[in-house]
Amino acid sequence: MPDLILEIGTEEIPAGFLPPALDDMKRRFEGFLKENALAFDTVETLGTPRRLVLIARGLPVCQEDREEELLGPPKAAAFGPDGTPTKAATGFARAKGVSVEDLGVKETPKGAYVCIRRKVEGKETAALLSAFFPKFILAIPFRKSMRWGAGTLRFARPIHWILALFDGAVVPFELDGIPAGNLSRGHRFLAPEVFKVTDVEGYLRGLEARSVMADPARREAAIRAGIKEALESGALLWLENPELLTEVTYLVEYPFVVIGRFDEGYLELPREVLVTAMREHQRYFSVTRPDGTLAPMFIAVNNTYREGLDTFVKGHERVLRARLEDARFFFEEDRKVPLEKRVEELKGVVFHAKLGTSYEKVQRILQLSAYLADSLGVPGEAVQRAALLCKADLVSEMVGEFPSLQGIMGRIYARLEGEPDEVCEAIYEHYLPRFSEDKLPEGAVGAVVGMADRMDTLVGCFGNDLVPTGAADPFGLRRAALAILRIILEKDYALSLTEWVEKAAALLGEKIVMALEPLTEAVREFFAVRFRGVLQAEGIAFDTIEAVIARSFDDVADSARRVRVLHEFRQDPAFASLMLSFKRVVNILEGQEMEGDAVVDPVLLREAPEKALFEETERLRDRFLALMDAKDYRTALELIATLKPMVDRFFDEVLVMDPDEALRRNRVSLLTGIQRLFSRFADFSKVSASL
C-alpha cells in the first residue's frame, strides 16, 4: 500500500510551538482519513525547528465505491393519494440530480420517507489530499503567527518549501505561491543543499545523511547519550529537567553535547540562582556531585558541529560568565535592602487597574490571613509576618531578571535576614501549588497566606466581571480555585466559604462593583464546578456529589467528607432498595407543600404501621442529629437504613391520601418530617436508585 510524506519547511519555529502543533497534525489527519473512509496502517508526525513532517503508511490509492442513501420528504407529502408526485418529490429529485422515477421509499421509525439509493464512485486519494492539504496546513495551531513579505499567509514562521509525495508522485497544490514538490533540504549549516525525495525511507535516510534527525524521540535519546558520554566516569551527574530537555530537543535538528566549566567562586550564589540562570538564559543543564551539591560545570546542547569543540565550549563559558556575573551583582544589590523595606516599594507596582497596587493587595492579604488563622487556629504572629513579606521579592533585582524565582528569592533573603523558619518557608510555599499536579504547602502558615492571596484575587476579579470565558483565563482563576480546594481537602480545613467570600469582599470595598449576594453565589458555584471535578477524578459518581452539594456547599471539607461516605455507602447491596423507598416518600410528597414545622398529632395515628414509623423516627431523631453534629456520617447513614422496612410497610398498608383531610395532612406531615430529617445529610432525590 502507498505511503505519504508531507514536509513543511520553515524558518526556525520556537521550540514550545512544536509539540502541540505536531499532536494537532496527527489528530486532524487521522480524522480526515476516517471521514473519507480511507484505511491506513500508521500516521506519525516528526518535527525539528525547520520542518513539520507528516508520514502516513498504508493508504489506499482511492476510496472504495459505496452505496449512498439520501432521505427526502415523507411519502405522504411526496405523493398524492393517486400516486402522483407532488412538488416536494420533484423538487427533491431535481436537487439531487435524478428523475422522479428513481425515487424509492424507505420505512423508518418515524414513518415512510422518499429516498434515493445510488452508487458513489470512490475518489482518488491524491485528489482528496490535494484539496485538503492547503486548509490542513493553515489550520495548524500556534500561540502566535506572522505574515512575511507581500504575502497574506499567516504561519508560525515563514514557509520556504513544501514537500508532498503520495505513492512516489507529487501531490499537486500551492500555498500562497509556494508549490508542493519533491525536494527537501538538509541541516541549515552542515548540509543546506536541496535533495530529491522519492519515498519515505529515502526521505528519512536523506535527512540523516544531511545531519537532520527528524524524530524528536531519537533526538532526546541522542541528547541523553551525549550527556552520559560527556560526564564519562559517572562521578558527576546532570540535574535532569524534563521541560528543559523537551525544549532543547526541539531547538536542534541534530544534537551535539558539550560540557563546560565556570569559576568556582560563583558557587557562593544560592543554588536556585545558578540553576535558573543556566536554564532560563542559556538552556544549559546543571551538573551535580554525588552528594547533590552543584559542580562548577554545565552541559550545553548545540545544533552544529565542527572540528575543535574547544571553540564552542569557550564561547559557552564566556557567555555564561557574563550571566553569572550579572546574577552575582543582582544578589549583592538585593541584600542591601531588607525585605520589610521593599514592601513599601510595592506601592509603585500595579496589581490590576481595578484592584489597586501590590501594596494594597498585601494589606488585604494581611487581614484575610488573620481571619483564616483565627478560624483555623494557626499561629497568628507567623502568619502576619509571612503575609507582610510574601510579595516583597517581586521588586528585587533578582526576581526582575528571573520571574520564576518569585517566592524562592523571598525565602532566601528572609533566611539571610534571620526571619523564623516557618515565615521563610511560608514566603515560598504560599505560591504552592503552582499547577494542577504541583506539591502542596507543607506548613499551615504558607497554606493560610496562599489561600488568602488567591481568594483576594478571585473575589476581586469576580466582583469586576473579570471571569474566565471559554479557554481564556488570563488571571488564572480556575487554577487559584483548584489550589484552594486541594489545600482545604488535604489539610481538612473547616471554613465557611460564604463568610470567607464576604470577608474578602468587605476588604476590597469599593474596588468591586458587583452586589454581595450575586458575587457570593457566583464564587460559590465556581468552586462547586471545580469540587465536582476533583471528586469525579476519584471515581465518585456525579449524582452522589450533586446530592450533597444540593443540600449544602459551604464547608468544603465537610461536603467532601459526606460525599465520600455516601459513595462508600452506595457499595452496600441494600442501598438501591433503600433509595427506592426514599423516592416513594419524595414522590408522594410532590405537590404537597408543608409550611413551617411538620407537626404530627399522635392522636391521629390510626394504623399500626404509621404508629410504628412515627415512634421509630422519634426514637432515632436525636441520635441521628447527634451523629450529624459529630460528623459520624457513616453511622448516620446506617441509622437511616434501619427505617426502610417500616417505610415499606407504611406504604403497603396505609393510605396516605386518605379522604379524611386531617388524617391525610397528618400522614403527609409524618413523611415530610422523615424527608427533612434525612435531608440534613443530602438531597437523596438526586441519587439514582441504580448503582
Image: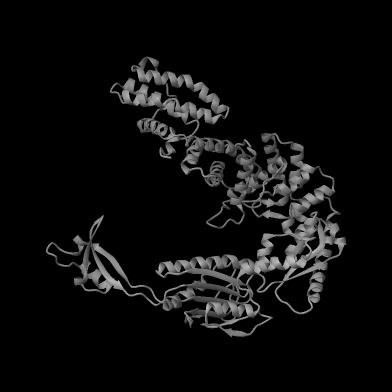
Looking at the image, what colour scheme do you see?
one colour
Pick out the residue farthest to the front: 233
Q: Is residue 392 above or below residue 540?
A: below
Q: Nearer the viewer, residue 127 or 159?
A: 127
The image quarter containing residue 674 is top left
Pick out the residue farthest to the left: 82
The image quarter containing residue 106 is bottom left
Q: Nearer the viewer, residue 552 or 654?
A: 654
Q: Is residue 171 above or below residue 316?
A: below
Does residue 323 appear left or right of residue 610 in this picture?
right
Pick out the residue farthest to the right: 265
Question: Which residue is at a point 46% across and 27% down the rendered structure image?
Answer: 640
The image quarter containing residue 202 is bottom right
Disc tally is 0
Question: Which residue is at a point 43% across and 18% down the rendered structure image?
Answer: 615
Residue 183 screen position, x and y as percent: 56, 83
Query: Taking the image as drawn, is residue 343 in sight?
Result: no
Question: Which residue is at a point 53% across and 55% down the rendered structure image?
Answer: 469
Quarter containing the N terminus: bottom left
Does residue 326 appear left or right of residue 509 in this picture?
right
Does residue 233 appear left or right of residue 621 in this picture?
right
Quarter containing the C terminus: top left
Question: Which residue is at a point 39% across and 19% down the rendered structure image?
Answer: 612
Residue 575 screen position, x and y as percent: 44, 34
Residue 334 screen position, x and y as percent: 83, 56
